[in-house]
Amino acid sequence: MTKNEKIAVFENFAQQAARRMEEKKKHRKERLRIKSMGDTEIEIRGLSDKELNECFEFSEDSIEVDRYTMYCASQTLQEAAKLLVAQGTLKQGQEYKITETFNAVERNFIVKHILALSGAVGDAEIEVISEVEEIKNS
Protein backbone atom coordinates (compact mmCIF):
# COMPACT_ATOMS: atom_id res chain seq x y z
CA MET A 1 0.00 0.00 0.00
CA THR A 2 1.41 3.37 -0.99
CA LYS A 3 1.67 6.32 1.35
CA ASN A 4 -1.22 8.10 -0.44
CA GLU A 5 -3.40 4.97 -0.18
CA LYS A 6 -2.68 4.73 3.55
CA ILE A 7 -3.60 8.39 4.02
CA ALA A 8 -6.86 7.84 2.12
CA VAL A 9 -7.69 4.83 4.32
CA PHE A 10 -7.06 6.80 7.51
CA GLU A 11 -9.04 9.80 6.25
CA ASN A 12 -11.96 7.52 5.38
CA PHE A 13 -11.78 5.91 8.83
CA ALA A 14 -11.72 9.34 10.50
CA GLN A 15 -14.81 10.43 8.54
CA GLN A 16 -16.66 7.22 9.46
CA ALA A 17 -15.64 7.62 13.11
CA ALA A 18 -16.86 11.23 13.21
CA ARG A 19 -20.20 10.21 11.66
CA ARG A 20 -20.66 7.37 14.18
CA MET A 21 -19.76 9.63 17.11
CA GLU A 22 -22.41 12.12 15.98
CA GLU A 23 -24.94 9.29 15.55
CA LYS A 24 -24.27 8.04 19.10
CA LYS A 25 -25.33 11.43 20.47
CA LYS A 26 -28.86 10.84 19.19
CA HIS A 27 -31.05 8.85 21.55
CA ARG A 28 -33.06 6.22 19.75
CA LYS A 29 -36.55 5.70 21.16
CA GLU A 30 -39.27 3.05 21.15
CA ARG A 31 -42.84 2.91 22.40
CA LEU A 32 -43.80 -0.27 24.18
CA ARG A 33 -47.31 -1.51 24.93
CA ILE A 34 -47.58 -3.31 28.28
CA LYS A 35 -50.55 -5.59 27.70
CA SER A 36 -50.63 -6.89 31.28
CA MET A 37 -51.28 -3.31 32.42
CA GLY A 38 -54.35 -2.72 30.27
CA ASP A 39 -52.40 -1.84 27.11
CA THR A 40 -50.51 0.92 28.89
CA GLU A 41 -47.78 2.44 26.72
CA ILE A 42 -44.37 3.62 27.83
CA GLU A 43 -41.58 5.21 25.87
CA ILE A 44 -37.98 4.13 26.36
CA ARG A 45 -34.78 5.56 24.92
CA GLY A 46 -31.21 4.47 24.53
CA LEU A 47 -28.80 5.61 27.22
CA SER A 48 -25.35 7.11 26.79
CA ASP A 49 -22.27 5.23 27.97
CA LYS A 50 -22.10 7.56 30.98
CA GLU A 51 -25.75 6.88 31.86
CA LEU A 52 -25.25 3.13 31.45
CA ASN A 53 -22.24 3.23 33.78
CA GLU A 54 -24.33 5.12 36.35
CA CYS A 55 -27.03 2.45 36.10
CA PHE A 56 -24.58 -0.45 36.34
CA GLU A 57 -22.97 1.09 39.43
CA PHE A 58 -26.30 1.87 41.11
CA SER A 59 -26.38 -1.35 43.11
CA GLU A 60 -24.76 -4.75 43.47
CA ASP A 61 -28.24 -6.25 43.09
CA SER A 62 -28.86 -6.92 39.39
CA ILE A 63 -32.63 -6.55 39.77
CA GLU A 64 -32.20 -3.09 41.27
CA VAL A 65 -29.83 -2.21 38.42
CA ASP A 66 -32.49 -3.31 35.91
CA ARG A 67 -35.18 -1.27 37.66
CA TYR A 68 -33.01 1.83 37.81
CA THR A 69 -32.04 1.40 34.15
CA MET A 70 -35.71 1.21 33.16
CA TYR A 71 -36.49 4.32 35.19
CA CYS A 72 -33.58 6.30 33.70
CA ALA A 73 -34.53 5.32 30.14
CA SER A 74 -38.24 6.17 30.39
CA GLN A 75 -39.64 9.67 30.64
CA THR A 76 -43.06 8.00 30.96
CA LEU A 77 -42.01 6.21 34.15
CA GLN A 78 -40.32 9.33 35.52
CA GLU A 79 -43.47 11.43 35.05
CA ALA A 80 -45.69 8.73 36.58
CA ALA A 81 -43.31 8.44 39.55
CA LYS A 82 -43.59 12.20 40.20
CA LEU A 83 -47.36 11.79 40.48
CA LEU A 84 -46.98 8.87 42.88
CA VAL A 85 -44.56 10.86 45.04
CA ALA A 86 -47.03 13.75 45.14
CA GLN A 87 -49.76 11.29 46.19
CA GLY A 88 -47.49 9.79 48.86
CA THR A 89 -47.44 6.33 47.24
CA LEU A 90 -43.69 6.52 46.53
CA LYS A 91 -41.04 8.14 48.70
CA GLN A 92 -38.93 10.91 47.25
CA GLY A 93 -35.52 9.50 46.30
CA GLN A 94 -37.13 6.12 45.59
CA GLU A 95 -38.91 7.12 42.39
CA TYR A 96 -37.25 4.32 40.41
CA LYS A 97 -39.27 1.83 42.46
CA ILE A 98 -42.22 2.54 40.18
CA THR A 99 -40.64 -0.16 38.04
CA GLU A 100 -41.60 -2.77 40.66
CA THR A 101 -44.96 -2.87 38.86
CA PHE A 102 -43.34 -4.93 36.09
CA ASN A 103 -42.85 -8.67 36.44
CA ALA A 104 -39.47 -10.32 35.77
CA VAL A 105 -40.28 -11.24 32.16
CA GLU A 106 -41.43 -7.70 31.34
CA ARG A 107 -38.41 -6.21 33.14
CA ASN A 108 -35.98 -8.39 31.18
CA PHE A 109 -37.69 -7.56 27.88
CA ILE A 110 -37.61 -3.82 28.55
CA VAL A 111 -33.99 -3.77 29.75
CA LYS A 112 -32.84 -5.77 26.71
CA HIS A 113 -34.54 -3.22 24.46
CA ILE A 114 -32.92 -0.33 26.33
CA LEU A 115 -29.50 -1.93 25.94
CA ALA A 116 -30.16 -2.53 22.23
CA LEU A 117 -31.26 1.09 21.74
CA SER A 118 -28.10 2.15 23.58
CA GLY A 119 -25.92 0.12 21.24
CA ALA A 120 -24.69 -2.06 24.11
CA VAL A 121 -26.04 -5.37 22.77
CA GLY A 122 -26.77 -6.75 19.34
CA ASP A 123 -24.90 -8.27 16.47
CA ALA A 124 -21.51 -6.74 15.72
CA GLU A 125 -20.85 -6.24 12.05
CA ILE A 126 -17.20 -7.23 12.30
CA GLU A 127 -15.35 -9.96 10.49
CA VAL A 128 -11.78 -11.18 10.72
CA ILE A 129 -10.03 -10.55 7.42
CA SER A 130 -6.56 -11.73 8.40
CA GLU A 131 -4.72 -13.08 11.37
CA VAL A 132 -1.69 -11.09 12.48
CA GLU A 133 1.21 -13.01 13.95
CA GLU A 134 2.89 -11.56 16.97
CA ILE A 135 6.61 -11.11 16.47
CA LYS A 136 8.61 -11.55 19.64
CA ASN A 137 12.08 -10.17 20.02
CA SER A 138 14.34 -12.71 21.71
Image (tube, helix red, strand yellow):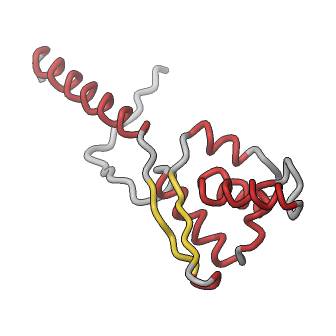
Image quadrant where one finds the N terminus = top left
Q: Nearer the viewer, residue 129 or 115?
A: 115
In percent of the image, x 50 and y 50: which residue is there? 118
Residue 56's spot in the image, x, y percent? 70, 48
Residue 11, quarter of the rendered image: top left
Q: Looking at the image, which residue sits at the far front?
A: 87
Q: Nearer the viewer, residue 68 or 93?
A: 93
In percent of the image, x 40 and y 59: which residue is there? 123
In percent of the image, x 89 and y 55: which residue is there? 91
Q: Is residue 68 above or below residue 21?
A: below
Residue 53, quarter of the rendered image: top right
Taking the image as shown, residue 81 lies to the left or right of residue 46, namely right
In percent of the image, x 33 and y 50: which residue is there? 126
Q: Looking at the image, which residue sits at the far top?
A: 3
Q: How many numbered marks, from 0 up?
A: 0
Residue 69's spot in the image, x, y percent? 67, 54
Residue 40's spot in the image, x, y percent? 58, 76
Taking the image as shown, residue 129 lies to the left or right of residue 48, namely left
Q: Is residue 15 above or below residue 93?
A: above
Q: Is residue 119 above or below residue 108?
A: above
Residue 9's spot in the image, x, y percent? 18, 26
Taking the image as shown, residue 74 lies to the left or right of residue 25, namely right
Q: Nearer the viewer, residue 39 or 25?
A: 39
Q: Nearer the viewer, residue 25 or 101?
A: 101
Q: Is residue 31 above or below residue 65?
A: below
Residue 35, quarter of the rendered image: bottom right
